[in-house]
Amino acid sequence: MKNIVILISGGGSNMAAIVNTAQREHWSDKYGARVAAVISNKADTKGLVFAREHGIATEVLDHKAFASREDFDAALAEVIDRFDTPGHPVLVVLAGFMRILTPGFVAHYAGRLTNIHPSLLPAFTGLHTHQRALDAGCKFAGATVHLVTAELDHGPILDQAVVPVLPGDTADTLAARILTQEHLIYPRAVAQLLQK
Ligand code: GAR
């Protein structure tokens, strides 16, 4: 069985979309894959509650408890690699995981580390993507699923979704419109990776 480990920092709605899709589409039968664990760098997130309710192993690794970014990433990798199975290295899915990862961590998971970013990359890397799209007068916005490389919010694009920017939009209304699309493209992109 190939294990998927999902990393979150908050609400975990993308993680929930992947878990629900995996169940609905019978990923364990179709692809021999399952969501094995959800790891959060914050305790008491909604996402952890959802994961536990769905019988998924959870771990909390508080980055503030580590002296350096390198120490945190090493501890994170140690937890993730427990989910490797013979012949099947774990697939690591960042879903609203708000941490910058070290180059060593990224290299360790090269080709099997994905992220979703709420903009049409390569536009608007980094934070506050929705407000920046509004400020720039964009008529369209969206989200991107990509493989993670050492450069923040870069890396080969796996899927994208586009939504219109509507008159009167605020960062919140635009974010909500994009998030519903994220819930479609992220499970789809992960399923495609599992078929490779
Ligand atoms: C999502 O919109 C995701 O694209 C974004 O955080 C939100 C997490 O929501 N990720 C980033 O900004 C990463 N740079 P969720 O916890 O409900 O899935």
Image (spheres, rainbow, N blue to C red):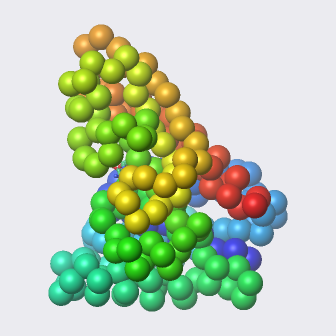
> Which x, y percent locates residue 76?
39, 81
The outermost residue toward the right is 29
> Which x, y percent locates residue 78?
45, 88
Whether residue 116 is situated above or below residue 36 in the rendered picture:
above
Q: Quadrant of residue 44?
A: bottom left
Q: Residue at x 53, y 74 (%)?
A: 109
- Can you see residue 12? no
Q: Is residue 41 left or right of residue 90?
A: left
Most foreground residue, 25 or 65: 65
Split into 4 quadrants, where in the image is the N terminus? Answer: bottom right
Split into 4 quadrants, where in the image is the C terminus? Answer: bottom right
The outermost residue toward the top is 167
Q: Residue at x 27, y 18 (%)?
A: 137
Q: Is residue 138 left or right of residue 64?
A: right
Q: Is residue 138 left or right of residue 135?
A: right
Q: Residue at x 50, y 79 (%)?
A: 108
Q: Quadrant of residue 72?
A: bottom left
Q: Is residue 145 left or right of residue 1?
A: left
> Which x, y percent locates residue 4?
59, 69
> Which x, y percent locates residue 73?
35, 80
